[in-house]
Image: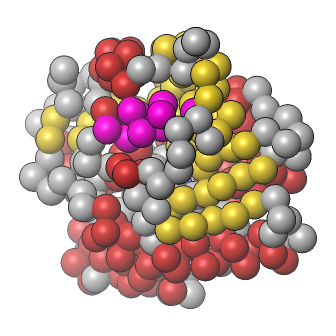
Amino acid sequence: MSQKRSALTPVPDEVGHHYDRFALSAATKPGDNLHVGYWDDPESEVSPDEAADRLTDVMAEKLKIGAGSRVLDVGCGVGGPGVRIARLTGARVTGISVSQEQVRLANSLAESAGLAEQVLFQRANAMELPFPAQSFDAAIALESIPHMPDRGQVLAQVCRSLRPGGRLVLTDLFERAPIPAAKRPTVDGFHDYFMSTMVQAEDYPPLLRQAGLWFEEISDISEQTLRKSFIWLSARMSRAQPGLAAMFGDEMTGRFDAADMVDVPEFGYLMVVAKRPEE
Ligand SMILES: C[S@@+](CC[C@H](N)C(=O)[O-])C[C@H]1O[C@@H](n2cnc3c(N)ncnc32)[C@H](O)[C@@H]1O
């Protein structure tokens, strides 16, 4: 296993407090997507907001769900992806986050969308999921796994909460190739604030197997996601900084610039599809 444990292993409650501060800042609105965009064609002019929804849709298609399916959204943010999935598929969505403030905003979104009967967000830690075994037909973890201290544990928790045959679709950050020493400080500066480890793509099949899940698909979607997202974020750094400052204090704002991440091709983004085997 080649996971690199950073100096700062995230503590879920602390991650939640960071997100609480972000949610309480003027930078956050209910329904915002807190994830990268997905551009089918890296040259396309699709807006970052549309591209962020597109990533939700690409993942939701792989869940193979429909009206009435029970979906767990692991690390639900402020509800954008969960509400979108419920609206587009008719599924019943339960979203969890370690941030109480995110949960509050996410539930206000479900309410204003008229979906409060179909979508519920609650504060919970993915490392200790508070649901009976086999409660869900599918689970999605959209850019939340990198914040968790132990991937094996969250995957085992998700496996237990899925019915046999249920699918998990997740995205994660990974090291596509060894990151040169000169670029390491940039990547660590991005990663170490409240994220745990960098995996390599090959780590996923054994991680899933040990958690009781069958590996179905792994895709390197760095080209479709990262570069344009970092270019977009770097153009908005002045607008993003108050939110980042609320989240991390002023130190972060001085040290992180999304522009530094634009040309780090060793830093990657992957999507994984897995399934709990039929009994
Ligand atoms: C980058 S945001 C992504 C949010 C959402 N999936 C989206 O795409 O808009 C990461 C999310 O993971 C949640 N998270 C991090 N660690 C968690 C944990 N241990 N248990 C539950 N949620 C967690 C955070 O609270 C946050 O909502």
Q: Residue 205: horizontal and vertical position, in percent?
A: 38, 15
Q: Of residues 127 and 81, which is closer to you in this image?
A: 127
Residue 167 falls in image quadrant: top right
The residue at the point 81 percent across, 59 percent down is 118
- Looking at the image, residue 132 lies above or below residue 205: below
Residue 184 falls in image quadrant: top left
The residue at the point 66 percent across, 55 percent down is 94
Range drawn in magenta: 153-162
Q: Residue 67: horizontal and vertical position, in percent?
A: 89, 40
The residue at the point 72 percent across, 52 percent down is 93
Give the left or right position of residue 135, taking residue 45 as reference.
left
In the picture, the quarter occupied by the C terminus is: top right
Residue 113 falls in image quadrant: bottom right
- Looking at the image, residue 257 lies above or below residue 35: below
Give the left or right position of residue 95, taking residue 4 as reference.
right
Examine the structure image and report whether residue 274 is included in the region drawn in magenta. no
The residue at the point 85 percent across, 35 percent down is 66
